[in-house]
Image (cartoon, rainbow, N blue to C red):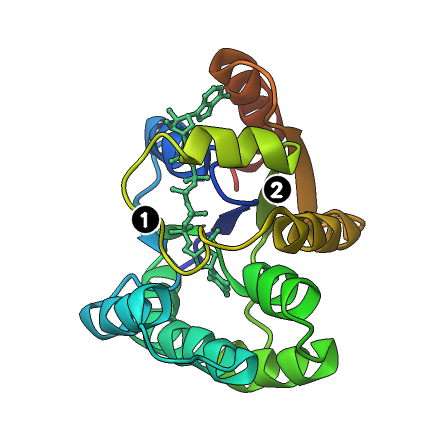
């Protein structure tokens, strides 16, 4: 059984990840592949409970504890959903993964990146995405889009400076060949044209 492909979508708040996950899913399915769609933190019942704590707790949450909770949720998702699906030949499309921990807890909160990479090794070893789509907009654009929604969670209540550090971290990560940068500041149609062009080579026969 050939292992499926692991695709992740990243970017700051409100950049259009959820909107485009459905589009990417359709592209993969139209090419004839099964795909499991998941998100982090979350994706399994246990990890969704951890998500609720991370996004909603009213208690003080030290940055290192926040980072450990992200990896606790990721461990549950990798063990019970992501690895089994990939091993069974399905593709996995995940809204955020360890790049988010590097960008948010590392660059945003100042947690040591080496510590994050050590935990990544413990939690998912050599399992990294085959392709990461990094949707990028100026922070003001993303926050403006997200502001039209419901009450803010712990992250959405952060200041502009925090999101600027997160975005800078993501752009630093985008130097890796695995990560493809998408200009998400343009119309949805133009964003999806870019995404389709990036993903097309992965969908051909023999992939
Ligand atoms: N987090 C972390 O700190 N560390 C980690 O390791 C992980 C996560 C895994 C929850 O993530 C939080 O967890 C997240 C980081 C942290 N917090 N923040 N910030 P999440 O992914 O669930 O939450 P999110 O980033 O807040 O997702 P979001 O706000 O739903 O954003 P989105 O999915 O990127 O955006 P969207 O909902 O698709 O679009 C927002 C609006 O813009 C919507 O009305 C769309 O119709 C509109 N839109 C989308 N594209 C366009 C274009 N091109 N033009 C105009 N309007 C558009």
Q: Using the rendered view, name the quadrant where residue 11 is placed.
A: top right
| Residue 44 percent across, percent down from the top left | 24, 67
How many numbered markers are drawn? 2
Q: Is residue 129 above or below residue 67?
A: above
Residue 54 appears in the rendering? yes
Residue 31 appears in the rendering? no
Q: Nearer the viewer, residue 182 or 2?
A: 182
The residue at 23%/72% (across/down) is 49
| Residue 120 percent across, percent down from the top left | 58, 78
Q: How crowded is mark 1: few (under 14 residues within 10 Å), some or many (20 or more)?
A: some
106 sits left or right of 46 in the view: right
Distance of label 2 from label 1 (alpha carbons): 17 Å
Residue 37: which disc?
A: 1
The residue at 39%/69% (across/down) is 83
Q: Is residue 8 above or below residue 154?
A: above
Q: How crowded is mark 2: few (under 14 residues within 10 Å), some or many (20 or more)?
A: many
Q: Is mark 1 on a helix, strand or loop?
A: strand
Q: In this view, does 41 lie above or below 21?
A: below
The residue at 58%/84% (across/down) is 119
Q: Which residue lies furthest to the left in this view?
A: 45
Q: What element carries label 2?
A: strand
117 sits left or right of 25 in the view: right
The residue at 59%/47% (across/down) is 132
Q: Which of 134 and 61 is in front in this view?
A: 61
| Residue 29 percent across, percent down from the top left | 33, 33
| Residue 151 percent across, percent down from the top left | 29, 46
Q: Are marks 2 and 1 in contact (CB under 8 Å)?
A: no
Quadrant of the image for the N terminus? bottom left
Label 2 vs 1, first from the N-terminus:
1
Residue underneath mark 2: 134
Q: Is mark 1 within 8 Å of ligand 1?
A: no
């Amino acid at each position: 059984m050939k292992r499926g492909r692991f695709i992740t979508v990243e970017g700051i708040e409100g950049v259009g990840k959820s909107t485009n996950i459905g589009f990417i899913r359709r592209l993969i399915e139209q090419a004839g592949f099964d795909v499991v769609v998941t998100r982090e933190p979350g994706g399994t019942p246990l990890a969704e409970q951890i998500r609720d704590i991370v996004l909603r707790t009213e208690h003080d949450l030290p940055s290192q504890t926040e980072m450990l909770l992200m990896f606790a949720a990721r461990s549950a998702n990798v063990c019970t959903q992501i690895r089994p699906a990939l091993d069974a030949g399905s593709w996995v499309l995940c809204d955020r993964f360890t790049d988010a921990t590097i960008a948010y807890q590392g660059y945003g909160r100042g947690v040591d990146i080496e510590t994050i990479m050590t935990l990544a090794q413990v939690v998912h070893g050599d399992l990294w995405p085959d392709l990461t789509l990094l949707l990028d907009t100026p922070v003001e654009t993303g926050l403006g889009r997200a502001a039209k929604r419901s009450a803010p969670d712990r992250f959405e209540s952060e200041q502009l400076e925090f999101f600027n550090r997160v975005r800078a971290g993501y752009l630093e990560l985008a130097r890796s060949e695995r990560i493809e940068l998408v200009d998400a500041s343009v119309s949805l149609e133009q964003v999806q044209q870019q995404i389709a062009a990036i993903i097309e080579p992965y969908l051909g026969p023999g992939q």
